[in-house]
Structure formats: structure tokens, C-alpha cells
Amino acid sequence: MKEGSLLGIIRYDAKAFFIALVLHTLLLFVLVVSVNFAERPDMPHKQVETVQAVVVDSQIVQAELEKIKKIEARKKSNEKLRLEKLADKTRKEEHKQKQAQKKRKQEEQRIADLKKERKADEKQRKVEVQQLADLQKKKQLLEEQRQAEQQRLAVIQKKRQQEELARDNARKAEEEEKRKKIEAIALKKKLAEEEQQRYLNSSKMKKLRSQYVKLIERHVGKKWIKPASANKEMFCNVIITQNRAGTVLSVKTDECKGDKAFQQSVERAVLKASPLPDPPSADVFDRTVQFTFVGH
């Protein structure tokens, strides 16, 4: 019996080991006794009985040995099963360890990836922070440039306003000067007209002007063609506009007492009388001549 098997029997079944030890001791004793009886030929009857006892005892021992073998076989089978279970358990443990190791490596890889991502994120964050700082700096620079531009434009605007104010003042001064000149000219003209009017209003000028109007009236009367409906009671106030040469520029009848034919005949006569006669004196010439034309 191998040492491993014997140790296995002792470890897992001490009772069976004890029985096997007793049987082996008994068998050894029987063998010794058998040898002793074989050396005594003078006692045949007792030898037969002894042989029979030995045979019986051998069968018992053989049966016990068979039992022991079966026990050992069962123990071996159980041990094999245990070892197989142990091996299976070991394989499972190894598989779990491998899985755990694989999982640990995956976790380590994940942590490494996370660290790498965190490092990349940190780097990106630093880049973004730097970009933000650059942007703020650029924004500040643009703001300073904008303020400087506003100040420059304010100076230009102020200068432009001053120039415009100076131009306005100059223009106003010029206009004021022109106004004063115009007023002076108008005043001078008015004074001259008033002087002329005073002159015209004098008795002599009134007489000459009356003569001039009568002259024009007679001249128009010569050109008048009396309509059939006209009579001595019909008259029209005639207003003539002429130039220096006496050319009639326009004629208008006003406050007429008469029919339409009479009014139109007077207007035609005035137009035919153009140019009008010269005044007896240049001082009595007037662009507008007014008289009353009476039918006859």
C-alpha cells in the first residue's frame, strides 16, 4: 500500500484503518501458527483442524481484505472526485482570478484612460482659459481703441461744430451785411420814390400827368370801334401796363357799366393803340396808366 493511500485512509477513516491493522496482525499470527504445526507430524488430527481453521480464517481475512479494497477504492473514488472538485474549484478560482485580473486590468486601463482624458481635459481647459484671457485682453484692447476713437471723433465733432459755428456766424454776419445793404438800398429807393411822388403830387406834375392820361385816352378813343349796343352812359375803368417804349403789355377793365361787347371793344381799342403816345415830360411816365373810358 502506498504511503499516500495509507495516509488518506488514516485521515478520512480511522476506524477502517484500525480494522485493517487488526486483520493484518491476525493473518500474520495464523501464518506463524501454521508453520509451527507443520513441523509436528505426529499430531495429524489436530493439524487438519488447524488447517480448517486457517482456511476459514483466511476466507474471513480475504473478505475483510475485499472490504478494505472496496473501502480503499471508494476512498480513491471519493478522493478522485474530491480532487476533481478541488481541481474544478481551483480552475474556477483561477478563472475568477483571471477574470478579476482581467477586470482589474480593464479598470486600470479605464482609470488610465480617465487620467488621460482628465489630463486632456485639463490641457483643453488651460487652452480655453488662455483663449478666454486672450479674448478678454483683445476685448479690452478693442474697448480702449473704441474709447480712443470716440475721443478722436469727439474732438473732430467739436472742431466741426466750431467750424460750423464760425461759418454760421460768418454767414449771419454776411447776411446781416447784405440785409443792411438791401435795407439801405430799399430805404434809398423808398426815399427816391417818396421824393418822386411828392414831385408828382405837386400841382405842376398833376397837371402834366392829367394831360398825359388825357392824351392816352384820346389816342385809345381814336382806335375804338363803337359796338351797336354802346351809348353815352356806358363806361369802363381801364388799367394799362406799358413799357418805356409805350408798348401795351396788358390791359384790364374794371368797374364797367355796360355789356360785354362794350367792355371787349374798349380792351381791343387799347391794344390797337399800342404803342401809346409819349408823355409830355419823362417825369410823368408811369408803367401803369389808369383812366375811365366813356362811350360816345
Image (spheres, rainbow, N blue to C red):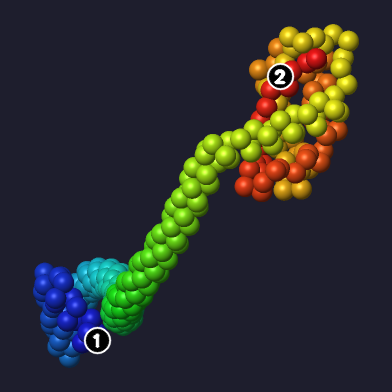
Q: Could you tell me residue 79's position as x and y percent?
A: 26, 73
291 to 286, vertically: above or below: above
2 or 1: mark nearer the eye = 2
Closest to the observer: 66 or 156?
A: 156
Query: Viewed as shown, does residue 23 lie left or right of 166?
Result: left
What residue occupies the far bottom of the structure in this picture?
A: 39
Horizontal arrangement in the rendering, residue 241 relative to residue 9 (left or right)? right
Answer with left or right where residue 288 lies relative to residue 278: left
Of the residues shown, which amino acid type is indicated by label 1?
Answer: Lys
User: Who is closer to the viewer here, 240 or 197?
Assistant: 197
Q: Position of residue 21 (x, y in %)?
A: 13, 78
Q: Mark 2 or mark 1: which comes first in sequence?
A: 1
Amino acid at pointer 2: Cys
**Quarter occupied by the C terminus:** top right
Question: Where does label 1 land, which residue?
Answer: 2
Question: For this rendering, which residue is in front, 46 or 69?
Answer: 69
Q: CA distance from mark 2 to mark 1?
A: 176 Å
Secondary structure beneath label 2: strand
Residue 77 seen in this snapshot: no
Which mark, residue 236? 2
Residue 122's spot in the image, x, y percent?
28, 80
Decide: few, some or many residues near mark 1? Use Cα within 10 Å; few <14, some 14-19, many ≥20. few
Q: Quadrant of residue 262?
A: top right
Q: Residues within 10 Å of mark 2 (few under 14, many from 20)?
A: many
Question: Is 266 placed above or below 87 here?
Answer: above
Image point (58%, 36%), residue name: 206
In the image, what residue occupies the spot 86% across and 17% down?
Answer: 226
- Give how far across and how far down residue 257 sits, in percent: 71, 12
